[in-house]
Amino acid sequence: MNLDWTALGVFAAFFVLVTVMGFVAARWRRPETLAHLDEWGLGGRKFGTWITWFLVGGDFYTAYTVIAVPAVVYAVGAYGFFALPYTIIVYPIVFAIMPRLWSVAAAGGHVTAADVVHARYNSRSLELAVAITGVLATMPYIALQLVGMEVVLAALGLTGHVPLAIAFVILALYTYSSGLRAPALIAFVKDIMIYIVVLVAVAIIPLKLGGYANVFASAERVFAAKGSGGLTLAPAQYLPYATLALGSALAAFMYPHTLTGIFASSSGNTIRKNAILLPAYTILLGLIALMGYMAHAAGITVSSPTAVVPALFQALFSSWFAGFAFAAIAIGALVPAAVMSIGAANLFTRNFWKAYVNPAVTPAGEAQVAKVTSLLVKFGALACILFLPTQFALDLQLLGGLWILQTFPAVVFGLFTSWFRGTPLFLGWIVGFFGGSYLAWSNGLKPLHTLVIGGDSYTVYVGLLAVVVNVVVAVVANLIVRAVSPATSPRTA
């Protein structure tokens, strides 16, 4: 191993710091007991504006985001910036929808989106569909956090799977002990570190490379030489870029980990404030994306684009700052991975275990099932990275975005209208989920599909196309069901 001992020492110091914080978190805002899903899985539903801001920002803007967004920009240019409009569009959606979802969940004691769906429609099949989709979409997302951490560990000279496994075992233990309080507390450190790293990088790197004019000119020359990509979108990319951004925005807060942060908030007003404050992360994301262009100006060449950010820091910064940056990225994997595993565990506990295995389970029993499940989820994601090709996790995460978007009608429509019934929404989910999966599979697991209408071709995001068909099927089926059976279905919330 070619170890950089200075960088490794700085990295290890910060990793030890967050590990201690993870275990101490069990005493932070200590409740009477953690043996309750509200306390272990949602932090007591008491997180105020700032804690929610760090927590939601921490699990929405992940380590893989820091690695992947510059990597895509490095590889294809302007098209990689689709994450910016998507994270701008998403916050008006959060402002309009999530306070209502929070109030329904808090009033009914619901822990998951599937809980809300069952209460609104009294439909076990629709609840199960939402729960299964949430778990399936979350697992590869956790695995991608491991990919981000693996890239950083490799840059430090720590090759092989043992260091990654040790880091994840530590994460599993303090999440088991402290629940959602652990990633909430660690998110403070993670986000501050990421802000420092990015602000230093966007200020210092261009100075070393002759300014931003040279950065952009160098990147343009590279794209021109290879005949693909560029600093601006080609006209043919406008529609796919726009539909990918819109579809991703609609899907973003349907994931169990983002909803966990919403349900843990202290009030609907806290969520509205965060919808106003969280776009600060979008500015950060734009700055992070620019590193893809900076890598071209610095002459960075890598075997895989995911190695671009670590290679850039190693080439242009001293070892101690590179170690600090790598620690920030690695901690940026721990926070979302913890929240994701908790979100998946909450789904399993409430919508599988309690619904079908042990309906009489006590609150303490629920908490214990969730703790064990969170361990299994993490080790399942670790096994995926250890024993399967990384591309498998990437492909599944691509499908995960398509899948989770199909839960949008079931979760959101019932918050604002009583017109829909559960069965039509379930039929819409079936068509959107399996039809969208088929389209993605037939396109070689690419996120885009080309429609030919009247001799003209239109390339759009598969997930958005699938959810449109999902809604059309649900509306038509609902009209038929209401015509056949005019009586409204009972609601429990």
Image: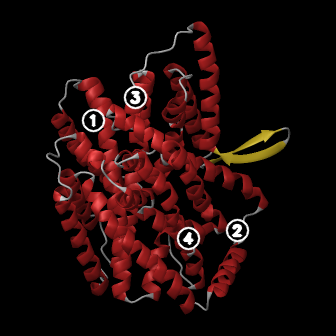
The amino acid marked with disc number 4 is Ala
> Which mark is first along the chain, 4 or 1?
4
> Which mark is first along the chain, 1 or 3?
3
Q: From the viewer's perspective, is 453 left or right of 427?
A: right
The amino acid marked with disc number 2 is Ser
Residue occupying the far left of the picture: 32
The residue shown at (35%, 48%) is 266
Mark 4–mark 2 CB contact (< 8 Å): no
The amino acid marked with disc number 1 is Thr
Q: How far is the residue under mark 1 from the one under mark 4?
A: 38 Å
Give x and y (percent) for residue 298: 56, 85
Q: How far is the residue under mark 2 from the one under mark 1?
A: 48 Å
> Is 460 located above or below residue 415 in the figure?
below
> Pointer 1: what residue?
349
Work out which quarter of the rendered image holds the N terminus and state it. bottom left
Indicate the colouring scheme.
secondary structure
Q: Which mark is residue 228?
A: 2
The residue shown at (61%, 89%) is 211
> Pointer 3: what residue?
128
